[in-house]
Amino acid sequence: MIFYRRFVSLILACATVCLAFAAPVQTDTSPEHPNFSGRWRMVKDKSDFSTAHAPDMVVQVIDQRGSTMNVHTIQTTGTTTKSADVSYVLDGSVSKNMINNHEATSKTFWDGSVLNVRTTLNLSNGDEELIEDTWQLSPDANSLLETSHVSTPKGGIIMKLVCEKEAT
């Protein structure tokens, strides 16, 4: 059984090397899912905001402990700076937040080393906005890729935010 586990670990390690963004190689003593904790700064020339106006600066401070992940985001566009705080429960339970003054309900699930967050916002006109995010760490855990699929009754866009981990 131990040989089989090590063989599977070796195959997974080889597959991980082939991916541009994946979790660090897992061993029997490492956590099952990556920890996104840290201070992350947007790399603007690697990010893609589609038709949305790209911010000048995004910094996220993430604190992930157990089955909870708290995300504090500061975003500057021109002379306007906004901040937001959201919390996610990583065990698949529903979490509720206020996003841009709208009630939001999120549910997370893991797909291997990728964290998926599905958020529904109730807009003031009665419409719903669906945001499907994926969170992935690079193999060295120094880059974070967040891909967002935003869907509204008027259409949708796909955005990519690439961040590098800042030294603490």
Image (tube, rainbow, N blue to C red):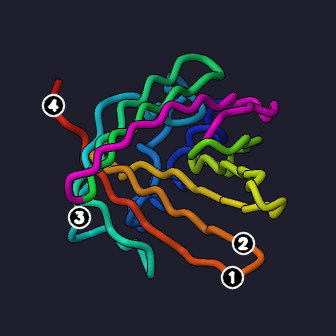
Let me know if residue 7 appears in the view. no
Q: Does residue 84 belong to the magenta stretch?
A: yes
Q: Name the residue under label 4.
A: 167
Mark 4–mark 3 distance (CA, rounded to whole Å): 18 Å
Q: Which dot, 1 or 4, sits closer to the camera?
A: 1
Give x and y (percent) for residue 123.
74, 56
**Cβ atoms at labels 1 and 4 below 8 Å apart:** no
Q: Mark 1 points at which residue?
A: 155
Q: Which dot, 4 or 3, sits closer to the camera?
A: 3
Q: Is 66 situated above or below 47?
A: above
Mark 1–mark 3 distance (CA, rounded to whole Å): 25 Å
Q: Which amino acid does label 3 sit on?
A: Lys
Mark 1–mark 4 distance (CA, rounded to whole Å): 39 Å
Give x and y (percent) for residue 149.
61, 68
For marks 1 and 4, the one nearer the N-term is 1
Q: Name the residue under label 3.
A: 44
Residue drawn 65% across and 22% down? 67
Q: What residue type is labelled 1?
A: Gly
Q: Which mark is residue 46?
A: none
Image: magenta residue range: 78-99
Q: Which residue reaches farthest left?
A: 167
Q: Which amino acid does label 2 sit on?
A: Thr
Q: Name the residue under label 2.
A: 152
Let me know if residue 115 appears in the view. yes
Q: Does residue 29 belong to the magenta stretch?
A: no
Give x and y (percent) for residue 90.
68, 31
